[in-house]
């Protein structure tokens, strides 16, 4: 990321973030019915904390300032734990396509949360980009099939997952509000440890009754991926970007997730999508190109240096 502006580095971090998150959808679907959601997510937070803890240990350790006001980490860890639990709870009854459609509401929710918590203003250009990205994401999700879109119905699972998406949207501006200068990797460690504690308390019954020794091999593969790639790495990337970009811009990268999922599915040998779906991919890329243009320095939002 040498030579890039702080905002440019934030965008690159979120590009990597969206690709890694997409992989968790493909692999997560293979293990969803093999282990209780609370047990899986408690384990992923624990493994991710170990990985990030090792990184912190070899890069200077934890500064004394990071130990002040530990309640901050429980706020952030609780928000992300809520998102993951709600996601898996919602997927028990909500079809993946419907859940993905709900997920595309996150950027708009994050823009609202950014205004309420940080007074970040979504400019007309950003609003246009969010709209284009949302249309493109829905186009990809429903595979350019209008009848599939019309068949979308809001059910109990979708409502549960929607509450999780609200927690995810609030998390982004809260990182900026609660960070007191700690490096992203150190702040991530605190969030992961707190989230692990919250999930362990919440899901202790599931953790205790899970037959960890006899879990299928695919569960361990999926667990390691979501813990290291879709948790440890993405937590750092998300917090890094959240300190450099407005919340709406950060969460706009969720629009790329359906497109990345297509690439993952192609890599796993599940076929190539039709040409019409590429229209949606083009729209999401167009939205990001619009967002790549730096904001006017006179806008209320101030970039993190």
Image (cartoon, rainbow, N blue to C red):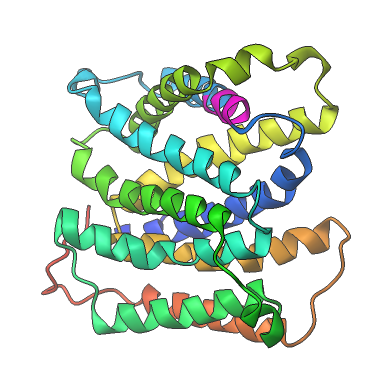
Q: Position of residue 90 (x, y in %)?
A: 57, 48
- Answer whether residue 150 is magenta in the image: no
Q: Pinpoint residue 129: horizontal percent, then vertical percent.
A: 39, 80
Residue 221, above or below 263: above
* The residue positioned farthest toward the front in the image shown: 156
Residue 161 seen in render? yes
On screen, residue 190 above or below 149: above
Quarter of the image for residue 158 reads bottom right
Left of 76 or right of it: where is 257? Answer: right
Is residue 176 left or right of 256 when viewed as pictured? left
Q: Magenta residues, as a range?
A: 38-45
State whether residue 16 appears in this view: no
Where residue 213 sits in the image (x, y, percent)? 79, 13
The residue depicted at 46 percent of the width and 43 percent of the height is 83
> Is the N terminus in the top left, top right, bottom left or bottom right quadrant?
bottom left
Q: Position of residue 76 (x, y in %)?
A: 33, 36
Would residue 97 appear left or right of 284 to someone viewing this image? Answer: right
Figure check: 4 above or below 41: below
Residue 73 position by quadrant: top left
| Relative to 104, 214 lies left or right | right
Residue at point 24%, 73% (across, down) = 122
**Main secondary-structure element of the magenta-colored stretch:** helix
At x 46% / y 75%, what residue is drawn? 288
Mark count: 0
Who's the residue at 33% across and 32% down the image? 187
Q: Quadrant of residue 59?
A: top left
């Amino acid at each position: 990321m040498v030579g890039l502006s702080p905002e440019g580095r934030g965008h690159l971090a979120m590009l990597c973030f969206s690709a890694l998150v997409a992989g968790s959808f493909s692999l997560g679907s293979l293990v969803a019915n093999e282990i209780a959601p609370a047990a899986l997510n408690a384990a992923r937070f624990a493994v991710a904390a170990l990985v990030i803890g090792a990184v912190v240990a070899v890069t200077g350790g934890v500064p004394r300032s990071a130990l002040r006001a530990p309640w901050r980490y429980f706020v952030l860890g609780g928000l992300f734990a809520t998102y993951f639990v709600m996601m898996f709870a919602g997927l028990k009854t909500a079809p993946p396509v419907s859940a993905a459609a709900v997920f595309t509401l996150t950027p708009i929710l994050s823009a609202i949360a950014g205004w309420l918590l940080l007074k970040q203003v979504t400019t007309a250009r950003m609003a246009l980009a969010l709209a284009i990205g949302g249309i493109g994401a829905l186009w990809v999700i429903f595979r350019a099939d209008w009848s599939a879109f019309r068949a979308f119905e809001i059910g109990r699972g979708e409502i549960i997952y929607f509450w999780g998406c609200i927690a995810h949207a609030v998390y982004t501006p809260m990182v900026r509000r609660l960070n007191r200068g700690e490096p992203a990797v150190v702040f991530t460690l605190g969030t992961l440890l707190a989230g692990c504690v919250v999930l362990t308390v919440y899901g202790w019954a599931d953790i205790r009754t899970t037959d960890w020794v006899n879990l299928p091999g695919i569960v361990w593969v999926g667990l390691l991926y979501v813990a290291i790639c879709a948790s440890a790495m993405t937590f750092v990337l998300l917090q890094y970007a959240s300190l450099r970009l407005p919340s709406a811009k950060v969460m706009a990268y969720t629009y790329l997730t359906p497109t990345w999922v297509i690439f993952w599915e192609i890599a796993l040998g599940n076929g190539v999508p039709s040409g019409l779906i590429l229209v949606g991919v083009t729209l999401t890329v167009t939205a990001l190109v619009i967002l790549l243009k730096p904001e006017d320095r006179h806008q209320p939002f101030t970039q993190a240096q």
